[in-house]
Structures are given as C-alpha cells and as structure tokens.
Amino acid sequence: MSNKKQQIIEAATKSFSLFGYKATTMDQVAKVANVGKGTIYTFFKSKEELLDEIVSSLIAEMKEAAEEVVDPHLSFFENAHRALYRFLEFRKKHQLLIKLLQEEKEIGTPAVQEVMKRLESTILAYIKQKIEAAIEKGEIKNCNPEITAFLMFKMYIALVFEWEQTHEPLSKEQIAKLFELYFLKGLSK
C-alpha cells in the first residue's frame, strides 16, 4: 500500500474516532493527512468508501484477534467463549468502533448503520462456521447454526454491555459459566 494511502487511512481513522463519521469532512482528513484534498480522491471516491476500507481492515484485525485465542485442543464452548469475548473486548477498546456505535445509536447515519451491520454479520458468520464444524465433529447436537450463532452473540452482548449498565460488571469467568449453563447444560434438571 502506498505511503500516501496509508496516511489518508490513518488520518480518516483518527477523525472518525474523534468527531464521528458524519461530522468528519474530507477537508479535515486532508489536513490531518497532510495531503491535498484531490489526493484523497485518487484513492477513494467518497468518504463512504474510505470508511468501508477502514472497517474492512478492522474486521480482518478482529478475526485475527479471535483466531489467536482459539485452541483446537479445547472444547467448542470454551473456544466460542474465548472468541466472542475477544470480539467484544475489541469493540470496547477500539476508539473508532465506540464512536461509530454511538453515532449509529444517536444519529443513525446510513453509512455507519451499513458498516456496523457488516461488522455484526461478519462476527455471526464466524460463529456460525464454528458451530457447523462442532456439529460435524459430533461435539454438539444438531441445531440451526444461524439461529444459535445469533443467540450466542446477543447473549454475550447482553452480558458484557447491557448487564453492567444497571449491575456490577460480570467477570470473564462468570460470563463463561453462564454461557456454559445456558448453552451447554440447559436449565432442565
């Protein structure tokens, strides 16, 4: 990747993280990147394309981060927990994602909604793939992988983000235990 393109991507990431997508102008990005506005347009047709490129590399980074904690010697549930936790830690720590999530909620900018949808469907596809592999190995019973991935992801978000808005935050271990209880064992005696 050319140096200029990298500079533009870094400048845009910085601007989107600070001011949000909607409030960021191409002029700002050009200033921060120390390039002419025209230079940006040689690499990106629009601000939307720029956001798209940034989120694409972010998605790749997230997948890599999840893969780092997955261990073939561990059970499906242990790995699913590790990967999901890693995804959500990424969301919590990454300034750009935090800002975009906030903008999606407060303003509902269509371009931002679009990339957040893409981010979520990537995570869901990742989990679904792991579920299908676990079914094939006979590690878990046959289920609808898409619905199961959706439920796992939503339960995680609820436990990591929503629970702590009104309660003491749960530890990683507590979350793992709950995950195991509801998904692995179920509630019946």
Image (cartoon, grey):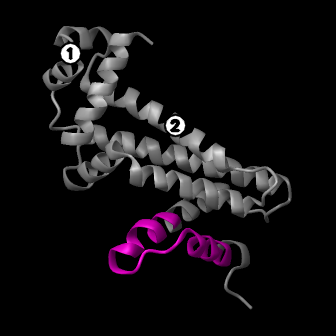
Q: Main secondary structure of the magenta part?
A: helix
From the viewer's perspective, is the residue at label 1 or at label 2 nearer? Answer: 1
The N terminus appears in which quarter of the rendering? top left
Vertical side of 64 occupied by 181: above or below: below
Say which residue label 1 marks.
Answer: 34
Counting from the top left corner in percent of width and height, residue 173 is at 60, 72
Q: Is residue 53 left or right of residue 21?
A: right
Label 2 element class? helix
Disc 2: CA contacts within 10 A as few (<14), some (14-19) or many (>=20): some
Tell which circle, 1 or 2, labels the residue nearer the N-terminal end: 1
* Stretch in magenta: 156-182
- Residue 99 against residue 55 in the figure, above or below: below
Residue 96 in the image, given as x and y percentages of width and height: 33, 42
- The residue labelled by disc 2 is 61
The residue type indicated by label 1 comes to: Asn
Residue at 20%, 23% in the rendered image: 32
* Residue drawn where x is 56% and y is 72% of the image: 175
